[in-house]
Image (spheres, grey):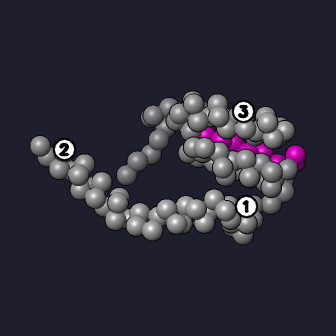
Amino acid sequence: MLGSLQISIKATKYQQLLQGGMEFREWLAENASEVLRRVGLREEMIILNYGCGTGRFTILSAKIVGRKGKVYAADVRSSALERVKKEAENEGLETMETVLCGSSDVITG
């Protein structure tokens, strides 16, 4: 019983944190490239995108760092990495590498 109570509390807190989250996600999707540049990404950098998911930031990062840079896309889901790798190939991005992380590699807390 206690376990389900903890899950319920966490879910409620998560929903409260995400109020307005969809608008932010939409804004971020539209402005991701500019955001990456403003946080300091530039040509020739080496980047780790930990928890790459759909690869939106991975692909954009690879385009920004260019041929002299490198982007590592890391995720615990091989399906996510396969999708990102295929997208990179379709975009002609040769400086991106995928890294499959095990569940023991994930830090929570």
Residue topped by disc 2: 3
Residue sticking out furthest to the left: 1
| Whether residue 40 is visible | no
Question: In the image, residue 20 lies at what x, y percent?
Answer: 45, 68
| Whether residue 59 is visible | yes
Residue contact between numbered discs 3 and 2, judged by CB atoms under 8 Å: no
Left or right? Give the position of 68 relative to 29: right
Q: Earlier in the sequence, mark 3 or mark 2?
A: 2
Residue topped by disc 3: 86
In the image, residue 69 lies in the stretch drawn in magenta? yes
Of circles 3 and 2, which is in front? Answer: 3
Left or right? Give the position of 30 relative to 8: right
Q: Earlier in the sequence, mark 1 or mark 3?
A: 1
Other residues around mark 2 within 10 Å, as few (<14) / some (14–19) / many (≥20): few
Amino acid carrying label 1: it is: Ser
SS at mark 2 in the image: helix
**Quadrant showing the N terminus:** top left
Other residues around mark 1 within 10 Å, as few (<14) / some (14–19) / many (≥20): some
Of circles 2 and 1, which is in front? Answer: 1
SS at mark 1 in the image: helix
- Magenta-tinted stretch: 67-74
In the rendered view, tell whether residue 51 sits above or below residue 100.
below
Q: Quadrant of residue 92?
A: top right
Return the mark for residue 33. 1
In the rendered view, tell whether residue 48 sits above or below residue 40.
above
